[in-house]
Amino acid sequence: MARIFSRERTFLDPVMRPVERWIYRLCRVSEEQEMHWTEYGVAMLLFSVVSMLVLYAMERTQQWLPLNPQKLGAMSPDLAFNTAASFTTNTNWQAYVPETTVSYLTQMAGLAYHNFMSAAVGIVLAIAFIRGIARRECKTIGNFWVDLTRVTLWLLLPLSFVFALVLVSQGVVQNLRSYDTVKLVDPQPGPNHMLITTQTIAQGPVASQEAIKMLGTNGGGFFNANSAHPFENPTPLSNFLEMFAIFAISSGLTYTLGRMTNSVRHGWSVWAAMTLLFLAGVTTVYWAEAHGNPLFTGVDQHASALQSGGNMEGKEVRFGIANSALFATATTDASCGAVNGMHDSFTPLGGLVLLVNIMLGEVIFGGVGAGMYGILIFVILTVFIAGLMVGRTPEYLGKKIEAFDVKMAMLAVLISPLVILVFSSISSVNPFGTSSIMNAGPHGLSEMLYAFTSAAGNNGSAFVGLNANTPWYNTTIGIATLVGRFFMIIPMLAIAGNLAGKKYVPPSHGTFPVTTATFTVLLVSVILIVGALTFFPVLSLGPILEHLLMVAGRTF
């Protein structure tokens, strides 16, 4: 990635350079002209707004458009807004059943397009931030249109093409056929004493969307069951590859940070902080799920040759506890939102970890690009705190961190908590919010809290006990995705532009090194303290209280 954005030669240049130049000529883009951070931000916002409006129009008119063999109708206005906002912001929250709501054209030209573009936007914003750190006395941070074109042509398209073929080899479906209707071997009783003798098997262009869904940390499934569906995730190998793809680009960006700032050790220090938080999360989730639910009296929850043991509610038998816990932790760490098990059915402590992963700002690898610029915000705060402790102006890779940088960093950090807590509190005390929850007591609060946390964190996964397809939730969750994405990006770009214009300050004996284990531990501490102080009260009323009541034998 460092070579792509530094315009160094790669093995794809003979193929991609002619395509790139043709795109620039068509769009009248000067690839040599760079942008001030405000220009970069405006270009990004205009591109996102236009893309969102096009998707909204497609969703509202899909009944008249081609590639709709199931004759699916238009989305309602509030659901179309929610979906358009969600996919534009890389959230991919789905308040609908995809196989009965979205046509093939909308899936491919609408949703899959946004899977590519929202991921590309996140990556180029991270690169712009890294350029701001690396450059000295410079007024520009790159060209948005050039960065967007290069990351799509050189990175996302080739990786997705290869990964889609690999998924097809594992049995992931890729076709444009109408749904098949088959006879059941064992007919089942239905409503009104009717006997169900047939089943409709949904299919479509799944592999092509599945590839970018994972690589771009988008998460929106072609099917309602997402990566628990055998047509999306059929084998143990596909399950492993999908988890690997979730972290692939976000993890690689830490090395890109090191390469572009000429401090590879700093990149590894940031990677180490992310890895420590990931390992702590997955260990806790596995422990909680493997211990099962003490309220299931008389049920054998011990692992054996015949069963995985533990809390298997909402999990695929073929994946078991370990793969479900690993997938759930990875997808909430990386702002992906894809699931191979139902998070609503995890134990209270297991669900708590998934919530906290998102509440920490999606910086544990995080979404492609978004995780990198998110953790760099925390790096700014970390060196600021370190500077306060030694009584000198903080420095970061040769740049002095001043009041403006810290103010913008705090603004970016406080945006998501504000959206999450305000919308959750309103929903918890009004009938239009509480009427959608399926569980009373603390778990009902957790369902609402998770929805707005997932939206503001641009994750997209859900506690599916909440019926979110209502005007209130469609509108507020859509707003939360937009605020959580763009209101964090603007202060981040302001920091990048400010850092780019600063002079280089050589390190001295009093400079806090950002390449050591001490820095990694302090960075992890700052991330945890900010998250704990902000969300501990509401978590105490939700999953923590639910766990204590479960241990005491209380149910709702």
Image (cartoon, grey):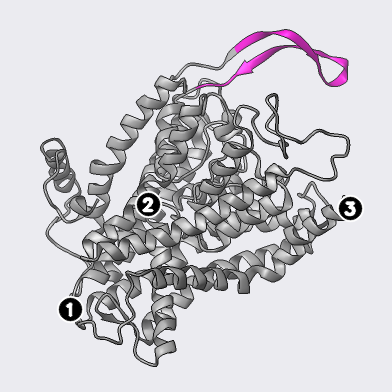
Q: Position of residue 266 (x, y in %)?
A: 31, 66
What's the amino acid at mark 3? Answer: Arg
Amino acid at dot 1: Glu
Of marks 3 and 1, which one's residue comes earlier in the chain?
A: 1
In this rendered view, identify the residue nearer to me: 270 or 531.
270
Hey, what amino acid is under mark 2? Ser
Q: Are marks 3 and 1 in contact (CB under 8 Å)?
A: no
Q: What residue appears at the point 55 percent right and 68 percent down from the top-left corner?
A: 528
Q: Main secondary structure of the magenta part?
A: strand
Is 29 displayed left or right of 486 in the figure? left
The residue labelled by disc 2 is 251
Q: Which callout, 2 or 1, points to the residue nearer the camera?
A: 2
Q: Nearer the viewer, residue 327 or 205?
A: 327
**Segment colored magenta:** 181-203
**Label 1, on which residue?**
137
Magenta run includes residue 304 = no
| Image-quadrant location for residue 539 | bottom right
Mark 2 residue crowding within 10 angstroms, few (<14) / some (14–19) / many (20+): many
Q: Are marks 3 and 2 in contact (CB under 8 Å)?
A: no
In three-dimensional space, the C-alpha distance between marks 3 and 2, rounded to whole angstroms, equals 42 Å
Is residue 234 positioned above or below 77 on the image? above
Q: Nearer the viewer, mark 3 or mark 1?
A: 3
In the structure shown, which secondary structural element does the residue marked by tag 3 occupy? Answer: loop
Q: Is residue 189 magenta?
A: yes
The residue that disc 3 covers is 554
